[in-house]
Amino acid sequence: MKSAAEIARAVRGGECSAMQVLEECLAAIKAQAAPLIAVTRLLEERARAEAGRIDAMIADGIDPGPLAGVPYGVKDLFDVAGLPTTAGSTIYADAPPATTDAEAVARLRDAGAVLVATLNMDEFAYGFATINAAHGTTRNPHAPSRLAGGSSGGSAAMVAAGLLPLSLGSDTNGSIRVPASLTGIYGLKPTHADLPLAGVFPFAESFDDAGPFTASIADMRLVWEVLSGKSAALSGNTPRVARLGGRFRENADPDQLAAIDALAPDAPLIELPDIARARSAAFLITAYEGGHLHREALAKQAMAFDPATRDRLIAGALLPRALYDEAQAFRAEYRARIEVLVADHDVLLAPATPCTAPPVDDPRITIDGKLVPARADLGIHTQPISFTGLPSLAVPLYRPGALPLGLQLIGRPHGEAELFRFAAGLEEQGAIGSIPPPGAA
Amino acid sequence: MPRVPFFPSFQLALRRWFAPAGEAVVADPAQVPQAPEEIDAAAAEAGIVIPEPCAPGVAANLALLASHAARMRGDAS
């Protein structure tokens, strides 16, 4: 599939219609998406109405916007007008339909993009695996016997497979960056709360963020500009880069460490203090907020929850408020400490996931020499960054013939433009880049 | 049948032993409930009846959260 920028350029220039782009996209999805178990609802009627509106604007000489005719999908927790927002759960399958689109969807729509599908996720975004009892387990387009990661796994798989040029996901503790790393695409967790969250089903409000997946850095920058309403200038000073050491280098693939050291051989190695404490505090805050969000539903119909999330949510609902307050106090103090520590750097380099995609039939990974569940622990390197609220862009290492693996480029607060600029340079050098899987659309 | 964690049960027994006569034994307000009595009390307070099939999983998750609480507080073990 063409990039979002190429599609928009062609539609705006009258080289093809939004409807032609859409019909090609729908045909490819119908022919190829089923084995991925990534699509939960195909929105043909709405998509044709949106594409028709774009073509009518072009015919009237009106510019539909920078994403004219670009098809996209959203994780199943964004409000879509006229549909129930399920958050991947059967509990909300018959909920009253959303009356308006989520703000992020509205901004993409107003920029000319065409919503095509809602996409699979771990129930209530609680997991790094996209193993969903109702919809099934999303498969990795590069190796269908392996996980795509989660919780925004459907959104990642569709872009990685070349069936959509962009999609939206959400990231609480790594739910964009983990699947981006495992499927070999770009995924952005913005500075906390910088991109619109209105109309996004919450998980743990202290850390929830919305963000895009794309197959190139140019598309990422384009979509971020639409969603944020800001401009990301491509010129600027040479970024000050550092490598994250300590825990980040203890559980990493050797290829990731080699790539980091090759990308920035002279960059200082800095260690974020108390990283294990921070991750544990993030676990506690997430469990408490998730559990208390669903407390009422758990009281009424616990057995209707996905078995993979039910016990975790109940446990979270039983955590005492005093412990939560203690974790939040630690977080406030920790964030202040980290912001001072990283103030002299524009980009911090770290692994995105500790390994490549684990197998679907044995979803475990090795952390500190022990086998642990992938669902809970694939976010070992992303969760501490969420805790700080810093922006983090997952980028795919360019490694033809090997399973995808990503790095995190972590920025200063509101430093996304610097991350894009640095990533664009790496992409130009051939150090990072998305490789379509065999037989991709 | 889930294995009852020894240490939290032992702590609870100690608190019971030393509690003044007639006074309810209240779990430490900043501790993760782990002993079966603590879990039952926390569930009752939250208005949740833990379904039988979920009990082992809930206990296991609470044990995991207790280990995170300990780590957050600087216990390196």
Image (cartoon, coloured by chain):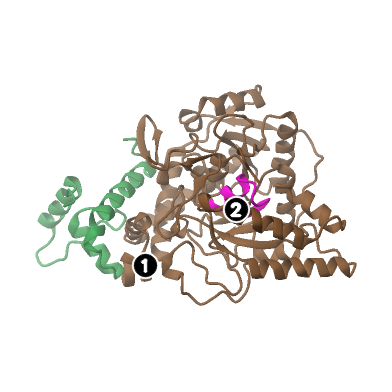
Chain colours: A brown, B green
State the residue at coordinates (41%, 46%): A375
Across and down, in percent, residue A407 comes to: 59, 36
Q: Is residue A12 magenta?
A: no
Q: Read off the chain for label 2.
A: A
Q: What residue is disc 1 on?
A: A295
State the residue at coordinates (59%, 43%): A339
Q: Quadrant of residue A401?
A: top right
The residue stretch that appears in magenta? A154-168
* Amino acid type, label 2: Ala
The answer to whether residue B31 is above or below residue A369 is below
Q: Read off the chain for label 1.
A: A
Residue A152 visible in the snapshot: no
Which residue is at the front of the view, A242 or A32?
A: A32
Across and down, in percent, residue A418 comes to: 72, 41
For label 1, the SS is helix
Across and down, in percent, residue A439 comes to: 62, 41
Q: What residue is disc 2 on?
A: A31
State the residue at coordinates (49%, 55%): A121
Which residue is at the front of the view, A135 or A334?
A: A135
Q: CA distance from mark 1 to mark 2?
A: 41 Å
Q: Earlier in the sequence, mark 1 or mark 2?
A: 2
Q: Quadrant of residue A244?
A: top right
Residue B56 visible in the snapshot: yes
Which residue is at the front of the view, B74 or A248?
A: A248
- Residue A35's disc is none
Disc 1 with disc 2 on a shared chain: yes
